[in-house]
Image: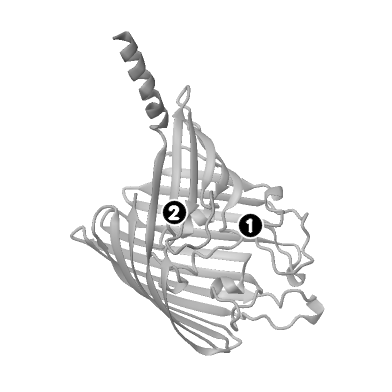
Amino acid sequence: MKKTLIALTLATLPVAASADVVLYGVIKGGVEVTRSFTSNIGDKGTSTKIVDYGSRIGFKGHEDLNNNLRAIWQLEQDVNIGGGNTGFSTRDSFIGLTGNFGTVKAGHLSTPVKDINGRLDQWEYDNNAAGLGIYTRTNAAVDRKVAASYETPNFAGFQAQAYVSPSDNNNNNNNSSFVSNNTNSPTDREAAVYGAKLGYENAGFFADVAGTYVKNSVTNAAGQGKDGYQAAANVGFENSNWLAGVGYQQSRYVDDVESFTGEPGTALGVNEIVKGSKEVVASAAYTINNAVRLKGSAAYGFDIKSLPTVGITPATATAPVLNDAKYVQGVVGADYLLSKRTALNGQVGYLELKDGNKNKYKKGAVGVGMSHKF
């Protein structure tokens, strides 16, 4: 009898040890039809593609230590239902500690701006015209970094975060900071990234403000040694039936022109560095009968200006590609909730960008798809 009890106890040990490991993720994809126009090429025709919407899979866990202290870890990566290139730990992956003092993490972490500027992007999409892809674009201030962060405990709905990515983690051949195509860019420059965030949530109301500062984000001849930053803010209300919110962001020396088009080789798609930009966004959604969710979003960008062509000196600089550029975007659609974890989506989006140099870029997109969380 004793031997049987011992055997049963030993058999349950691996189960108990693995009980805190959670497998989670989302698989999502669909079909997108897009049509675009550029001022130098004209109508580029229609493209129809089966696309992935940003599927991911992750593992996370924790271990309770002494004195209300807990060890936490997470490994999360992109996956692609279309078989595209993905990797391990490509999304937020870290090890850390959490307790009454707050939470400390070290690893591959989203910047504070990335944490908040996608809050109002309620769409599933691949092409940036089918969602708020321009507003949430990846750049030097948004791209995940190898970093350490500290987040305070929740004080009556308020939480703050501090973030730092060391210079040496951003100063190598696989630099995740923004570097132009200038082959003479220094590889030993100061390239630290700093960030901070403050958020408030209570009874459905939310407000967030965040900023990310990038040392030496510009390394082309026209902007050598320039530091970059991006600041963002949101305010709104969200519960199980409603979402309504507005946001604003401003950036400087963290983008290239392609960030605003997503397509190289167009009149607006050369790799020129954007000196600055300002953007506003608004989103709203309402769920009917716990099944149909009607959604709409709009974004407007202005004061978008680029530096002269990469690789030349200021003395021989040509006119920048973007001169007082603006963009406008709208997306409307709906989700049909098949269950708490499975949904169908459909939307129509339009994006137009133009500037004082009479460059113009237009794109329309229609998407239908499906997502499943696990």
Please state the horizontal and vertical placement of residue 262, each as a whole percent of the image: 54, 73
Please state the horizontal and vertical placement of residue 65, each as a whole percent of the image: 47, 25
Residue at 45% across, 47% down = 58
Residue beneath disc 1: 176
Amino acid at circle 2: Arg
Of 41 and 80, which appears nearest the observer? 80
Does residue 139 show up?
Answer: yes
Q: Secondary structure at mark 1?
A: loop
Q: Secondary structure at mark 2?
A: strand
Q: Residues within 10 Å of mark 1 (few under 14, many from 20)?
A: some
Pick the quarter of the image with the N terminus. top left
Q: Residues within 10 Å of mark 2 (few under 14, many from 20)?
A: many
Q: Is residue 225 above or below residue 40?
A: above
Of 214 and 312, which appears nearest the observer? 312
Please state the horizontal and vertical placement of residue 80, each as a whole percent of the image: 45, 60
Residue at 52% across, 45% down = 93
Amino acid at circle 1: Ser
Does residue 104 show up?
Answer: no
The CA span between labels 2 and 1 is: 20 Å
In the image: residue 245, left or right of residue 192: left
Q: Is residue 267 above or below residue 163?
A: below
